[in-house]
């Protein structure tokens, strides 16, 4: 039984962030989370993966996922366990994340007999990470989100075994982030920002307003760019955070001189994104983005009402290991056992052309509601 006098070995460190023992979060909000997230893709576009692992101190839960996408088939493995006082083990259900060298090398492994996916993957980066500005979003008298997050591109090596096949991962492009704070969709009590059910929630704190959100990670020569921007239904920018990082860790400001999107007819999935970026050192980058593989159906990871109980990430469900297969029938329809299933938000690994040079990167465009300035009706 954990109480306010329960001590943990981490309480011997000088790393406290709140006037509580280490087993307590600085807030009692049930939505408090701390999460690793990873993505990688074969530059040929034939295969990709996403993985993540998080702890939710106020829910007493640790959960994680590793999902792979080959062609039209998305294999999803999800895990959950009781957190108890084991807050330093970064693992759940055979999925483990080990920081070999901070901001340089991370190992992600999966070995669980209850799911047919095993993996041993190592992420290495020689780029400095970029930390976003502290983000706060409030609505209806309640904090909707308050998070800190950093990003970092890199390369993956290793292997992934899945039903009747094994893939060697050799110098695949990848990206990762680490975020912590408060966000919707944690613990099964409310809906996340991109959850298809969020629009049906009759609450002033539910995220129902029109929104376009773009998130971009792109490399060019010796620097890389992290870009996050949101627009409302009238095209007004409501959040913008972008930075270019040199290999030496120098932060350079970035501004957007052009931003155009071509959506696939009848869908909210893009065919092309075109950006003009001006970097603080005087460089101008012309970026053209097209999809490399299907956009991930994120409910398969546990986000957006995922897991078989429909309660999403951070919900108490004991020790669980789940596996299923989604079929991407077209650009927006996803099938589970032959029936359409909600997808949630759609992360997108992409082909990049920067000043005429081809590369690989990440560009997610998430939308909600009417965006007439972008050609999207309700």
Image (tube, rainbow, N blue to C red):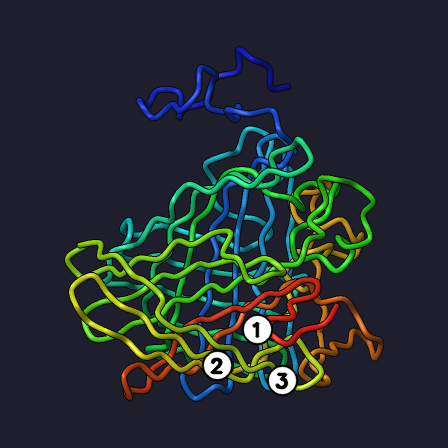
Judge left or right: residue 332 versus residue 65: right
From the viewer's perspective, is 317 left or right of 15?
right
The residue wearing badge 2 is 167
User: In the displayed structure, does residue 63 sit left or right of residue 255?
Assistant: right
Residue drawn at 63 percent across, 60 percent down: 233
Residue positioned 59% across, 65% down in the render:
366
Q: CA distance from mark 3 to mark 2?
A: 30 Å
x, y percent for residue 318? 72, 41
Residue at position x 50%, y 47% in the image: 35
Mark count: 3
Determine the image quadrant of residue 120. bottom left
> How would you rate the neighbour count of disc 1 (Cα within 10 Å): few for under 14, some for 14-19, many for 20 or more?
many
Q: Are the residues at dot 1 and dot 2 in contact (C-beta closer than 8 Å)? A: yes
Q: Residue 42, image x and y in percent?
A: 43, 81
Which of the labelled discs sits on residue 240, or is there none?
A: none
Image quadrant where residue 15 sits: top left
Q: Is residue 209 above or below residue 139?
A: below
Q: Is residue 102 above or below residue 89?
A: below
Q: Earlier in the sequence, mark 1 or mark 2?
A: 1
Report the front residue among 68 and 158: 68
């Amino acid at each position: 039984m954990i109480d306010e006098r329960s001590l943990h070995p981490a309480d011997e460190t000088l790393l406290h962030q709140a006037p509580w023992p280490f087993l307590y979060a600085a807030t009692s909000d049930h939505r408090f989370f701390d999460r690793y997230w990873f993505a990688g893709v074969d530059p040929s576009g034939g295969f990709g993966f996403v993985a993540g692992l998080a702890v939710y101190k106020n829910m007493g839960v640790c959960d994680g996922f590793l999902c792979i996408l080959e062609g039209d088939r998305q294999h999803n493995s999800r895990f959950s366990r009781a957190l108890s006082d084991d807050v330093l083990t970064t693992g759940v259900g055979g999925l483990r994340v080990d920081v070999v060298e901070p901001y340089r090398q991370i190992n992600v492994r999966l070995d669980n007999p209850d799911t047919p996916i095993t993996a041993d993957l190592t992420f290495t980066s020689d780029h400095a990470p970029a930390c976003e500005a502290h983000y706060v979003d409030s609505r209806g008298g309640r904090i909707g989100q308050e998070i800190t997050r950093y990003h970092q591109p890199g390369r993956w090596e290793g292997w992934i075994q899945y039903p009747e096949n094994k893939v060697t991962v050799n110098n695949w492009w990848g990206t990762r982030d680490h975020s912590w704070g408060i966000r919707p969709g944690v613990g099964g009590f409310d809906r996340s920002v991109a959850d298809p059910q969020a629009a049906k929630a009759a609450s002033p704190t539910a995220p129902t307003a029109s929104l376009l959100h773009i998130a971009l990670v792109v490399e060019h020569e010796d620097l890389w760019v992290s870009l996050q921007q949101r627009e409302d239904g009238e095209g007004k920018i409501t959040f913008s955070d972008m930075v270019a990082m040199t290999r030496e860790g120098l932060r350079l400001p970035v501004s957007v001189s052009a931003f155009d999107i071509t959506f696939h007819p009848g869908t909210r999935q893009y065919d092309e994104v075109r950006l003009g970026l001006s970097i603080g050192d005087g460089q101008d980058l012309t970026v053209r983005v097209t999809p490399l593989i299907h956009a991930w159906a994120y409910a398969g990871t546990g986000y957006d009402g995922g897991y078989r109980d429909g309660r999403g990430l951070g919900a108490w469900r004991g020790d669980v290991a789940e596996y299923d297969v989604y079929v991407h029938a077209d650009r927006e329809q996803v099938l589970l056992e032959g029936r359409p299933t909600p997808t949630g938000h759609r992360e997108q690994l992409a082909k990049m052309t920067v000043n005429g040079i081809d590369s690989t990167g990440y560009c997610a465009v998430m939308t909600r509601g009417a965006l007439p300035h972008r050609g999207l009706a309700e």
